[in-house]
Image: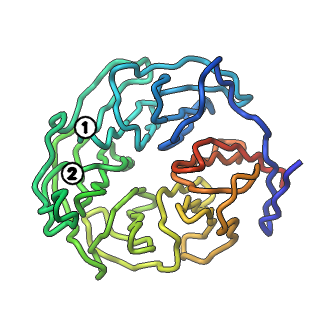
Amino acid sequence: MVSIDAGERTYELVPGWGELKPNWVWGLVGDVAVDSHDNVHVFTRTADPPCRIYDRSGKLLYSWGYGIFEDAHGICIGPDDAVYLTDRGPQLVLKFTAEGRHVFTLGDRGKHSDTGYTEESPTVKHAGPPFHHPTNVALSPNGEFYVSDGYRNCRIHKYSADGTLLFSWGEPGDGPGQFNLVHAVWEHKGKVYVCDRANNRIQIFTPKGEHLETWPGFERPCKLYIDSEDVIYVAELGARVSILDLQGNVLWRWGGEASHDPGKFTAPHGIYVDSQGAMYVSEVLEGARLQKFVRTR
């Protein structure tokens, strides 16, 4: 049994969680999210179905996505269980209803915006419109949503509920309101939290894109999730998971040295918590797996 003492919290690893059909592997698990029924949605980059949905016990309920997605990166689930999926390489964000009906697609498949980034000069020279390798989606309580964009851009784009672009913010750099690989976004209680991965920090903004503060000291933060108790969970590519309060105080940090041992991490890329406090961490690179940790205290 692998147990983790996280101060006021304790967790236990659920060994072997998640049914895999014959010849299936987890692959590079871009992200994970949980719907209102505590079903776990896994978005992964394999030739097997990229979208896999499990119940809390790890039983596979169904899978889908053959021929739709090429580069599974981010997943966001709304309060109505609508699913937003970010397909990084093809430059797309797609929305589906809980029943699987396609609602809209943002972006032009295979066509990216101009940010000055080229294969010969792989640096973002200036901000561009949507998209150049987008990373993830986050929802606002009023139905508006944000897209972080991303690997070859340096912007947060805000949209109306129907997918109309409202405005964007961000520039390349390491100053306030500037980004270097903006990787994820989350709105909570009137503040917008952004994983500024290559700058090793999280920046906080108003919903209008006005910079409020910066939290340094992360190891390439990839994804954050904020629960109903105002606790922030951060997946860091540098083999670490952090838990913070809304003031940015670190409540607990776990990992930091890459290991593929059960209960440790190599490259956390996605994180989510269900209604029972169980934590799911997805990994890419050499990690290539999903781990579940139940909260025991």
Question: Which residue sits at x=13%, y=54%?
Answer: 129
* Mark drawn on residue 236: none
Q: Looking at the picture, does residue 270 appear above or below residue 7? A: above
**229, 288: nearer the viewer:** 288
Can you say which quadrant of the picture contains the C terminus? Answer: bottom right
Answer left or right for 231 relative to 73.
right
Question: Which residue sits at x=54%, y=26%?
Answer: 52
Please name the amino acid that badge 1 sits on.
Pro
Question: Which residue sits at x=16%, y=56%?
Answer: 167
Residue 124 in percent (x, y) is at 20, 66
Q: For numbered disc 2, what is the local secondary structure?
A: loop
Residue 183, quarter of picture: bottom left
Q: Which residue position holds label 2? A: 132
Task: Find the residue positioned furthest to the bottom.
Answer: 175
Residue 224 in percent (x, y) is at 50, 57
**95, 51: nearer the viewer:** 51
Circle 2 residues within 10 Å: few <14, some 14–19, many ≥20:
many
Task: Find the residue positioned furthest to the right.
Answer: 1
Question: Which residue sits at x=58%, y=54%?
Answer: 227
